[in-house]
């Protein structure tokens, strides 16, 4: 399997919003398509908490990406037209500098010595990358889930740097239900004795805590409605059942176990804690005099597409409406699309046909 | 503080639905009001997973009960008219026989040697109590949350034993979202090394697992809407914050910590596991040829009141509608009340004014 990641060296020192700084930090990113001579066809994407920059396959890495059906030549986001950049968030563990990276000052992993991370830091790092690529203004900035919050931070911090925006299933500020969920995910990791205040190793790893955190994530990323149709009360076959007391009996439990197994060893627990808390901290309202609405109305864009899903319990539709209203008050031509996809928050990863249609239609007018 | 509990000895052996039997088992219960000479004014209540039989104060135990404002002389459930019985569910740890009770065969606590527990067992045990009290037919059987499922089991297993029924925020069968939540709560307990396959002690107790389980419970018992209004993004004062990494910063986190602290040492972890799994197993559809609707339509009642809450994500309104429709098809005069209380599943414990009004109006016609 190839690797299509490229790396961009951030300015050194790179100052963080809440204090502290990074030295010799870098961002991993991937690109698709070609930057036009006028450099006016760049579309940058911010991801959710866990995905890498590998949104789609490419000659350098033919493995399917996390948005494989959305992005590519002739697809909804057509890489024959757009120069697409997907950034691995600062603080993640998929190539960008994060808590599992080596601190050049000590030669050891940062672990909990990594400075406080905010989504503003992630936005500022990506802004440096864009400038480093010689792009004066992004044609489009797209963000989903946590990446949608990062995109709003980018827009607030770098006026005039983006022409159009696509906001998907995100939040202008973390609400208490989402904070409660994420706080509990972090607690599950922190309470795992193997977490050991961040000093775990491959041999002594907080699997239990990461498993609970991931399962809780999956529960809130989907919807009860989808699961009624998909799993109902179907039982596991007896040979699928484990012998231990209170082991899984229902397919829904097995589904969660599968999700957890694929995640637990593939995401750094400390990085998870940092990104999760950064999401809780985010509040676009800090950039206005009158809270969220005012801060959103200060953002200058030509146009925006805001998409939300009725069954999303983590980033509710009301928050997407709030973003759409706010950006419209700022003068952007805003299209608001409310989808009734049954897949909840994760619909943008699953219901590609409907998300893709809305995105393609929006991009066709740009 | 007094103790108003009475105890009823179940038949010995008491056969369990999935096999196994209990010896010298008993139920704890409390009563309010007086049984009429014709024994036709008995109203029995089944509780949710964690409450005790102490629904309201009484001369023997003047401490407030978990439904203090609902129940008492002149209150919505008027104990000057009704002889009210509240049962501590079989398998609970509040006086009835459960996993933390002594197994008379060994002189040791049952722990995981307690037989498989179902809500049908809980219903059958309560039926013995009713007969033991000399009551041929209950005037009303009320159940909320898990207790609503227990009540449906009672109605299916003991035809003709109840005249009217009040069903509150419950389910005719466990749906996959609720199973997923409960399974994760059980996993948090099971993964806690101190759980030790059920062999914990006061000194080595699965506090971490119980804390996560309870917090997840509270998150699903309430609603995102309520918390936006109640907690928003209010921070803790600096003196309220703990020093440890990733400690709570928001009031919503502190609220969950408070709930967990009040619960963790006050409910037996093994009993929690048994009752939680019993909820997952429940499916009224087992009592019909055509699934849930048919099973409900086989239940014979004069009348029923079914109450649900729009913001309940654990026992969604659609399931309350399903119960109402099914019982109506069985010939009962059914009143269905959908409340828009913001408190989610827990609304019946909080929004007493509206639940009480619906219940009082229903009971006035009986």
Image (cartoon, coloured by chain):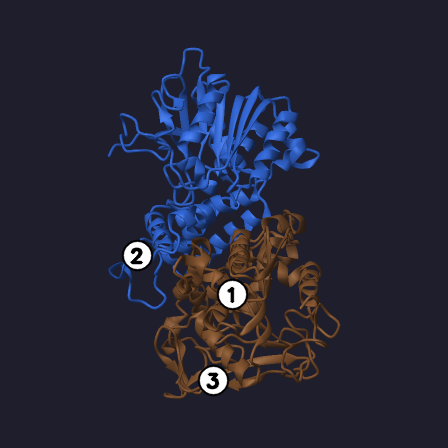
Chain colours: A brown, B blue
Residue A146 at x, y = what percent? 51, 65
- Residue under circle 1? A146
Give the secondary structure at mark 3.
loop
- Up/down of A103 relative to A88, above or below: below
- Up/down of A235 relative to B133, above or below: below
**Which mark, residue A10?**
3
Q: Chain of mark 1?
A: A
- Up/down of B307 relative to B200, above or below: above
Residue lying furthest right: A74
If you read the primary sequence from the N terminus, does the residue marked by circle 1 or circle 3 appear first? 3
- Residue under circle 2? B203
**Residue A59 quadrant:** bottom right
**Which mark, residue B222?**
none
Name the front one of labels 3 and 2: 3
**Residue B51 quadrant:** top left
Q: Residue at x 48, y 60 (%)?
A: A297
Residue B244 at x, y = what percent? 31, 67
Q: CA distance from mark 3 to mark 2?
A: 51 Å
Residue lying furthest top: B37
């Amino acid at each position: 399997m190839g690797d299509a990641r490229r790396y961009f060296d951030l300015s050194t020192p790179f100052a963080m919003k809440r204090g502290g700084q990074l030295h010799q930090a870098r961002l991993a990113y991937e690109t698709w398509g070609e930057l036009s001579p006028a450099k006016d066809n760049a579309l940058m994407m911010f991801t959710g908490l866990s995905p890498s920059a590998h949104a789609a396959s490419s000659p350098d890495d033919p493995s399917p990406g996390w948005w494989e059906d959305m992005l590519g030549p002739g697809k909804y986001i057509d890489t024959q037209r757009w120069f697409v950049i997907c950034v691995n968030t600062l603080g993640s563990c998929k190539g960008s500098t994060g808590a599992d990276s080596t601190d050049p000052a000590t030669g050891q992993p940062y672990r909990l010595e990594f400075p406080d991370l905010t989504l503003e830091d992630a936005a500022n790092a990506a802004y440096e990358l864009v400038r480093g690529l010689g792009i004066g203004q992004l044609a489009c900035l797209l963000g989903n889930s946590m990446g949608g919050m990062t995109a709003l931070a980018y827009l607030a911090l770098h006026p005039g740097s983006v022409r159009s925006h696509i906001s998907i299933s995100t939040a202008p500020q973390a609400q208490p239900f989402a904070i409660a969920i994420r706080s509990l995910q972090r607690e599950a990791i922190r309470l795992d004795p193997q977490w050991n205040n961040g000093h775990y190793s491959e041999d002594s790893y907080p699997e239990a805590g990461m498993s609970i955190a991931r399962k809780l994530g999956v529960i809130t990323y989907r919807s009860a409605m989808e699961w009624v149709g998909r799993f109902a009360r179907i039982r596991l076959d007896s040979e699928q059942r484990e012998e231990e007391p209170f082991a899984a009996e229902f397919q829904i439990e097995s589904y969660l176990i599968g999700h957890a197994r694929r995640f637990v060893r593939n995401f750094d627990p400390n990085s998870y804690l940092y990104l999760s808390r950064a999401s809780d901290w985010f509040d676009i309202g800090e950039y206005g005099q009158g809270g969220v609405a005012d801060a959103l109305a200060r953002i200058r864009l030509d146009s925006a597409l805001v998409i939300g899903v009725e069954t999303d319990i983590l980033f509710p539709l009301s928050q997407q409406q709030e973003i759409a209203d706010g950006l419209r008050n700022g003068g952007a031509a805003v299209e608001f699309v409310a989808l009734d996809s049954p897949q909840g928050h994760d619909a943008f990863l699953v219901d590609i046909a409907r998300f893709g249609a809305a995105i393609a239609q929006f991009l066709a007018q740009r």
